[in-house]
Image: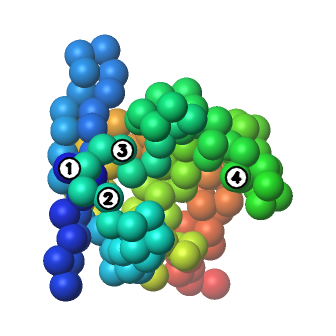
């Protein structure tokens, strides 16, 4: 609960880093719909003042493994299959889709392309090369780009 900040018009959540060196924590603004959904969830839970928002069976915080399992199971229940590259559905596929859809300005995430520097900041990447991996063009993207060229025929 200490990682969530909500007000009448905005909100943010502290995302805790992971990785070899513990990663870095960062505050990420919440989309208006995510904020509204989070407020509804907090109301349903009786507005807890402290502790983990989503708890394990013992009332403690979910482990990374348990959170990954929960997301994967929710995806399976929703009928979401593997990614285009065959990777099983899970948090990483969601993250990849978030980055890719923002940069390309497609899907339900973004209606227009977002600057790759901003996407890197939102994803917590220290360098643009890390973000670039999430946004590599497919063969279809390359074909569309070439089809967009004007020719003198």
Q: Please report whichever mark, 4 or 1, sits nearer to the chain's N-terminal start.
A: 1
Looking at the rendered image, the disc whose residue lies closer to the viewer, 2 or 3, is: 2
- Single out the mark in the foreground, 4 or 1: 1
Where disc 3 sits, the SS reads loop
For the point 43% across and 55% down, the residue is 99
Whole-percent x and y of residue 143? Answer: 65, 62
Give coordinates of residue 109: x percent, y percent. 48, 72
Q: Residue at x 32, y 58 (%)?
A: 48
Q: Which residue is mark 3?
A: 52
- N-terminal of the pair, mark 4 or mark 2, is 2
Q: Is residue 55 left or right of residue 131?
A: right
Q: CA distance from mark 2 to mark 3?
A: 9 Å
Q: Residues within 10 Å of mark 2 (few under 14, many from 20)?
A: few
Badge 1 or badge 2: first in the primary sequence: 1
Q: Which residue is mark 1?
A: 2
Which callout, 4 or 2, points to the residue nearer the camera? 2
100 is higher (above) or lower (below) than 112: above
Question: Disc 1 on helix, strand or loop?
Answer: loop
Question: Residue at the location (72% across, 45% down)?
Answer: 73
Question: Which label is found at residue 74?
Answer: 4
How far separated are the C-alphas under marks 4 and 1? 26 Å
The residue carrying pointer 3 sits among few (fewer than 14), some (14 to 19) or many (20 or more) residues within 10 Å by Cα, namely some
Asked whether disc 4 touches disc 2, contact meaning CB atoms under 8 Å apart, the reply is: no
Residue density around tag 4, few if under 14, some if 14–19, many if 20 or more, within 10 Å: some
- Which of 99/13 is in front? 13
Q: Give the secondary structure at mark 2.
A: loop
Q: Secondary structure at mark 4?
A: helix
* Whether residue 58 is visible: yes
Mark positioned earlier in the residue sequence (4 or 3): 3
Q: CA distance from mark 4 to mark 3?
A: 20 Å
Q: What residue sits 42% from the left and 33% below the top?
A: 60
């Amino acid at each position: 609960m200490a990682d969530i900040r909500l007000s009448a018009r905005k909100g943010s959540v502290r995302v805790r880093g992971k990785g070899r060196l513990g990663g870095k924590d960062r505050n990420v603004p919440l989309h208006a719909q995510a904020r509204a959904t989070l407020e509804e969830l907090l109301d349903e839970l009786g507005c807890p003042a402290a502790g983990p928002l989503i708890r394990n069976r013992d009332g403690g915080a979910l482990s990374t493994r348990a959170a990954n399992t929960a997301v994967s199971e929710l995806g399976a229940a929703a009928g979401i299959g593997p990614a285009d590259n065959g990777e099983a559905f899970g948090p990483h596929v969601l993250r990849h889709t978030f980055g890719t859809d923002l940069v390309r300005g497609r899907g339900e995430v973004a209606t227009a392309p977002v600057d790759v520097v901003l996407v890197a900041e939102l994803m917590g990447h220290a360098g643009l090369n890390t973000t670039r991996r999430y946004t590599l063009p497919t063969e279809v993207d390359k074909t569309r780009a070439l089809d967009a060229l004007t020719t003198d025929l």
